Amino acid sequence: MEAVQQLHPEEAEYRLAPHNVEAEQALLGAILVNNEAFDRVSDFLLPEHFYEQVHADVYQVLSKIIRTGKRATPITAKTFLPDEFTGDMSMSQYLARLAAEATTVLNASDYAQTIYDLAIRRKLIEVGDNLSNEAYTADVDMPPNKQIEDAEKALFELAEKGRYDGGFVNFDTALRDAVNLAGEAFKRDGGLSGISTGLSDMDRVMGGLQKSDLIILAARPAMGKTSLVTNIAFNIAKAYEPQTMPDGQIKAKNGGVVGFFSLEMSSEQLATRILAEQAEISSSDIRRGTIHESQFSKLVEASQEMAKAPLYIDDTGGLAISQLAARARRLKRQKGLDLMIVDYLQLLSGSSKNAGNRVQELTEITTSLKALAKELEVPVIALSQLSRQVESRDDKRPQLADLRESGSIEQDADVVLFIYREEYYLKNKMPKENTPEFFTWQAEMEQVAGRAEVIISKQRHGPTGTVQLHFNANITRFGNLAREDYLPEQLD
């Protein structure tokens, strides 16, 4: 089939990009002989993966014919292609030769994989060339880090085999994904469609943490928002159970790999919190060294168990949202990623174009986090501050309007959670001892001691309402309330 091979007479003058014309010809010939060959390759091979443009055009025409339920042959295909091919051969003759020289359809998948792999290599070369050219010609105000982030994003998309090209999907494809999701939930411990938080009452209402969701967790200081998200992070990492899929990819059967961006606390402080919770020893005692020998043994034992958990912490302060996105992509590519946590939202910065306008900057950040959750197909939990207006009300339970710069946060979030602990506010109202007011206060304190409310104010895919949890302030641990102590509120 010298005709196509001579389409590039200048080949000898420069180094050609990787390609295999014979594999392209063999695959097209196999499809023309037996259209079932197309079904074996159509789920991953696209026209743009062909090196020769004429082969891309032929493949696209064959695809359209077969998908309309008709038979694709040299005769039916030539109608939709220009008759001119080369000086000594028409398109009709070329299609007939492709079909005549096709040896077998059994190797169609191998031919297609070869074509696809070479297309990826060409794309890698393109990314490298673009990176090199941009490095030579970059503007003065374009920092090198921005180029690195762009390159990492391009490589990540390439590694994910073009899953982010966009476009519509058939409803049957969406239905298949929905059934697969239900099947995964059926197999997963607890029967959840999302990742279990380790807190059964939260899971019952939310169905676990759902892929691609942006979850905002907000509270006033001292309510325990970092403690709750730390508890959830370690519960998920500790429960991680990998499984190898038929295509060789490793996915989480239970639990997951967790990436924790801690912009406020150091990794050592976070580790101390988790260690205190797991060993059931006060974190302040650990920091001060006021523990006895048996407690130290528990610490060592707990730390050895914790070391196995796939929990990765990035404690770089002052990250830009673009830097965070690049690091999250890198983590998913290198280690895997099933849950991402950001502590906290207001410590991130946006691009320079929105510098000085905090509302626009936060809008950019929340929009980017939601886009990142969809791109990586993982839930993203972002902690957020609340405005001081909460403290001026008699009922200090947070509301959506209390979110600082709330417009974009509320709009972009799939789920908004608030933490409220009546015990914290009541403790500060302690009256004089041995008075009627004191005994009333004491009775109220006994009712709310060790309790926390997680208020679900927004949930796109489920009910809103309040979940009651147990909170041990000494070891900063959230847990499930005993069933006899907890009658769940009616959810909306």
Image (cartoon, grey):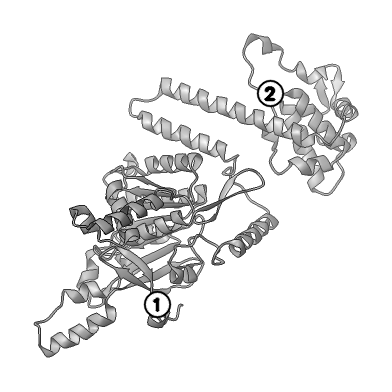
Residue 238, position as x, y percentages in the image: 44, 55
Q: Residues within 10 Å of mark 1 (few under 14, many from 20)?
A: few
Identify the mark at residue 482; answer none if there is no mark: 1
- Of residue 449 and residue 129, the one placed in the foreground of this image is 449
The reply, left or right, for residue 4 in relation to residue 283 is right
Which class describes the residues within 10 Å of circle 2: few (<14), some (14-19), or many (20+)?
many
Residue that appears at 71% across and 30% down? 114
Q: Quadrant of residue 409?
A: bottom left
Q: Amino acid at mark 1?
A: Ala
Task: Residue 406: tell me if it is visible.
Answer: no
In the image, residue 284 lies at what x, y percent? 21, 58
Marks 1/2: CA–CA distance: 65 Å
Place residue 135 in its image quadrant. Answer: top left
Q: Which residue is mark 2?
A: 19
Task: Tell me the residue at 33%/25% (across/down).
Answer: 140
Task: Please say if the residues under marks 1 and 2 sit with CB atoms less than 8 Å apart.
Answer: no
Q: Residue furthest bottom?
A: 436
- Mark toward the viewer: 1 or 2: 1
Outermost residue, top side: 13
User: Which residue sits at x=28%, y=82%?
Assistant: 447
Drawn side of residue 291 relative to residue 80, left or right: left
Q: In the shown orientation, is residue 463 left or right of residue 226?
A: right
Q: Secondary structure at mark 2?
A: loop
**Which SS class for mark 1?**
loop
Count of labels shown? 2
Q: Amino acid at mark 2?
A: His
Mark earlier in primary sequence (1, 2): 2
For image coordinates 20% across by 72% down, the residue present is 392
Q: Position of residue 302 (x, y in %)?
A: 36, 55
Instruction: Assign the N terminus to one quadrant of the image.
Output: top right
